[in-house]
Image: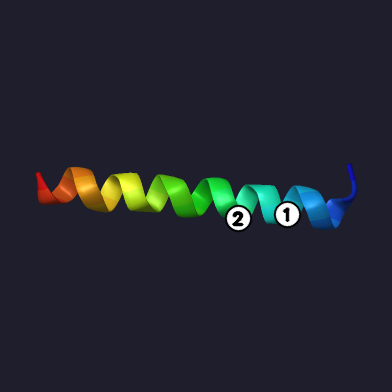
């Protein structure tokens, strides 16, 4: 994997984690 692809994957994972945290905070 290239660094660009790895960085993009990490960004997506962090984005998903952030969404889950926001949803849990609302519950």
- Residue that protrudes farthest toward the left in the picture: 27
Q: Residue at 42% of width from left, 45% of height from top?
A: 17
Task: Assign a secondary structure to mark 2.
Answer: helix
Instruction: Name which residue lies at 35% across and 52% down.
Output: 19
Q: Pinpoint residue 23: horizontal percent, then vertical percent.
A: 22, 48
- Left-right relation of 3 to 22: right
Q: Which mark is residue 24?
A: none
Classify 10 Å Cα crowding around label 1: few (below 14), some (14-19), many (20 and above): few
| Colour scheme shown | rainbow
Could you tell me which quadrant the C terminus lies in?
Answer: top left
Q: What label sits on residue 7 in the rendered view?
A: 1
The residue positioned 80% from the left and 52% from the top of the image is 5
Asked if the residue at tag 2 contacts the one at tag 1, i.e. Cβ–Cβ closer than 8 Å, the answer is: yes
- Which class describes the residues within 10 Å of circle 2: few (<14), some (14-19), or many (20+)? few
Distance (Cα) linking label 1 and label 2: 6 Å
Query: Residue 11, labelled with which disc?
Result: 2
Q: Residue at x 89, y 41 (%)?
A: 1
At mark 1, the secondary structure is helix
In the rendered image, the residue lying farthest to the right is 2
Q: Horizontal placement of 1 versus 7: left or right?
A: right
- 4 vs 7, left or right, is right
């Amino acid at each position: 994997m290239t660094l660009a692809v790895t960085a993009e994957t990490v960004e997506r994972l962090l984005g998903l984690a952030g969404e889950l945290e926001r949803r849990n905070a609302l519950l």
